[in-house]
Each structure stands twice: as C-alpha cells, then as structure tokens.
Amino acid sequence: MSGKHITDQQVRLFMQHRKSQTQTVAAAKAGISERSARRIDQKAHQPVKQERNWRTREDPLAEVWDSIVLPLLKSSSELTPVGIFDHLCEHHTDQFDPRARRTLERRIGCWRQLHGPALPVMFTQTHELGELGIADFTWVKEPVTVAGEALKHKLFHYRLVASGWAYAQITYGGESFSALSDGLQKAFRSSGGVPRQLRTDSLSAAYKNRQEQEDFTERFAEFCRHYDVQASRNNRGVAHENGAIESPNNHIKRQLKQALLLRGSYDFTTREAYEVFLQAVVARRNRRVSTAFKAEQQHLRPLPVHDSSTYSEHTLRVSRTSTIVLKRVTYTVPSRLIGSRLMVRLFDARLELWCAGVQTLTLTRIHTKGMQRQRSVNYHHVIESLVKKPRAFRHAQWRDDLFPSDDYRRIWQHVDDALSADKACHFMVRLLHLAKKSDRESTLGRYVLAGIMRGKLPSLLECEDRFLNLNPVLPILMVPQHPLGDYQALLRTGDRHE
C-alpha cells in the first residue's frame, strides 16, 4: 500500500475497529499499513474536517430576511422571534413558509449575537460570614388541606446568604408587619444571632414606598433598632436583585412538593401538623449546610435579652351579642365579658385578649380578603345563655356557625325535619350544651349520628347517661388494721400500773 493516499474514510474506519481490535487487525480491515496505523494511534494523522461552503437546499428566508425581518429587528430590541413569526404568517404568507419557524428563530439568534444590543450581566457576589440575612414572602400553590378544607397560605422565608442556612414558617394572612416581625424574630432565635444587614423587597409593612431613601415605617425602624440590624431593600420592581432569596424560594417550594408527594396525601388533621411537617422539610435542607452554618454562627451579632413586640394593640368593647369586631372579622368571646373593655394584641396567627391586665383568652386569627367579612363563632362562649332561651337558636343570624362540625349540621337537619320547631331547637341546644360539659364533642356527635342512621334518634337522657358522669366518684379509703399483739402490750402495761 506504499504510495497510495490514505482517505479520511479509511482513517475513520480504522479508528472504529481500533476500539475493539488490535492495531494489526484494525489496519487490515481499514486497508492501510501498520506504520500508518501507528501514526494514527499517535495522532500524527487525523481526518481532515472540511467546512462546507455551499447550501444543500434553498434558503427559506431569502425573500423576507433583508426586506422584512432585518428592518423589524433593527427597529426594536424587544421584538421576539415568535412575534416576528406571527407577523410573517399574518401579512407575508406568499413569501414565507410557516414550516421555517425554527430556521427563523436560529437566524434571529445568530444576528443578535453579532449585531444585537448589550444584554444585562449578572454579577456573582461574595458574601462575608454573618454579613447579610435576606427575607421574603412567597405563595404556596400546592393543594394543601386541613381537615378537608383548602388552606391558602404563604411562606415567610429567611436565609443567611453566606452559609445558605434557612428558616421558614407558614403565614395565613398578607405580608403584614406582624407576619414579618414574627418571622424575623423566630428566625433570629433559631439561628442564634443577628446579621449585620437585613435585606427585603419593598414590603409595605416595612417601607412607606415614597421617593425618599430613608422611608421605613416607624414600627419596622423600631424593630431594627431593637435588634441592631441595618435594613436595606432592592430597587422597586427589580426582583433579581434579591436573587439570593428568589431562587431559594423556588427550591424550598419544590422540596415541599416532593415531600408532599412522598407522603401520599396533601391533607393534614390540623394546622399545627402541617407546620411541623414544613419544619421537617426545612431542617432536612439545613443539615446539608451545617458545617458552613456553624462557621457563620460565630460571626452573628448577639441577640437582645428580650424579644421585640410583634403585634399591634387594639382596644375593643364586647357587645351585647358577646362579640368583638376586628379587621372585618366578628369573634365571639365568653359572655361574662359582655360590656367589658378589652385590650387585644393582634398577631399574625392569633389574638390575645387582655382584661384588667390579665390575659383571659387566646383566639385563632381569621384573615379576610379585600372587603369581605367573616365570623369566628365558638358555641362554648354563648351556649349557657342559649340554654335559657332555646327558641332563639332557630332564627339566630349565625346559627349555622354554632355547629362545631358537619356531624352536628347533619343532626340539626334531621331533628328539624323529624321534630316540631320547639322540640328541635330544644334538642339541638341541649346537645351542644352536653358537648361542652362532657368535653367529648366529636364522640357525642358521631354517637347521635350513628343512632340516626339506624333509624332511632337517641334521647338526651341516653346521651347524658353515656357521656356525662353525674354520679360522683367516692374515694377509696384504705384503713390499716393494727396487729393484735399491740393490744396485748397495752394490757401488760395496765397490769404493771396496778
């Protein structure tokens, strides 16, 4: 084979056979000498890559590129390939074939790389340990339910940027100051310290959002002074400046979704159970950065001795209906407080009611949307008065809210159909009274409903005998019996005295 030119095809064939054959065998199969094979193995002879300088088919954009597409690209940098494609399909169907869409997109991309405007550059930041903590709120779109009812909620998310340690908690209302301050305070406590700077977006709970640079709200400014932290925010409408939290927002929500899928159910018995579940997800994330977090903890500022207030105070008077109204929500309170003036501490998730300087009650906070109104009714607060006038139950404005569960609503539907108006009201009010006294609300409801399903409504006496122990339990007295030998000792003592 001396004097013959080795083609690129032979070289490629040799290299293919060389993967599984010896050099001699591969050279023979490719039709080349062993010396040439050695030169190929030593990369002294490689196939020549020749660039093709001719087209294999006609240019599908020849009629529209110079005359239509280029002027459009030069007129505006915001025009997208899809927008130009739609324009060509609508107004130049005689010159443009819609099947050339991918060719159009590639050609526009190449032109903009060569002639387009400068694009924004993301600058990777270097963060010192203990320097920056960043916080944000984000919606959770997973269909989480509590006892079968949809739970609309957000996550408050806080992150130490240098180490990646995170804290998250569930927020049921809006991005209020109470939600922000409560989340930050718990995050500081969980991390064991305070960073030198705190970054958020333009939250109305923290900023007045005017043109001035220093436009903190008074409460947020006081919060920052209490924890000795310098607050800052990104420019309005520029979310990527908070990239150290925006991207982790998506990460934690994706991990939450995966954890819910692995759990096999989106339903939880209580809000507390769901909150515990979320904390387990966050703890699993934090274990991955535990070494970096321990290093950053040493650079955090110490916590103050006392927590800052994370609530707003409201003074309200209890009405004759045993209710208070706050933030477009009507709450029932114990009837003994009618006419009293209460100081209410409004947190993000609860209300604390103080009377005469003593905390007397804690209520779960209800959040409203827009201008709608809601009610939070607890039959425990008014049932004692309702027992004295059971007929008021039928036409009470919030009668249906008095039922603690669907079981009691179904019981009412049955007795309202089966009994007279007065007897139905009497039965239902007494049943609710018994549920309060026995403290076995759910069990009592299931028992009565089961009797209805069997075709026999249990009487109130049967329910009381079963769920209310009216007979007091007498204590069992253990009286020790003295040994008889003690009496013999007493007799002997008497003989000596004689």
Image (tube, rainbow, N blue to C red):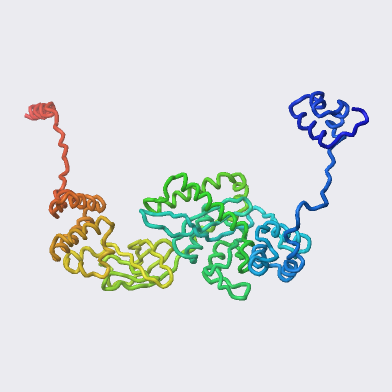
Occupied quadrant, residue 235: bottom right
Front-lying residue, 29 or 284: 29
Q: Quadrant of the N terminus?
A: top right
| Percent coordinates x, y for residue 288 in the rendering | 58, 44
The C terminus sits in image quarter: top left
- Residue 300 place in picture, x, y as percent: 60, 54
Q: In this image, 425 relative to 255: left or right? A: left
The answer to which image quadrant residue 496 occupies is top left
**Residue 306 seen by the camera:** no
Count of marks placed on residues: 0
| 421 is higher (above) or lower (below) than 276 | below
For this rendering, which residue is in front, 308 or 241? 241
Q: Position of residue 130 (x, y in %)?
A: 63, 54
> What residue is rendered at 84% in x and 32% in y?
40
Horizontal relation, residue 357 to residue 25: left or right: left
Residue beneath the point at 52% across and 49% down: 255
Identify whether 51 is placed above or below 306. Answer: above
Give whichever of 72, 335 is nearer the camera: 72
Q: Which of 49 and 355 lies nearest the eye of the viewer?
A: 49
The answer to whether residue 270 is seen in the rendering is yes
Residue 118 in the image: state x and y as whole percent: 75, 64
Q: Which residue shows up at 82% across the image and 34% down it?
A: 11
Determine whether, in the image, residue 63 is placed left or right of residue 442: right
- 456 horizontally vs 356: left or right: left
**Vertical order, 361 against 475 (above or below):** below
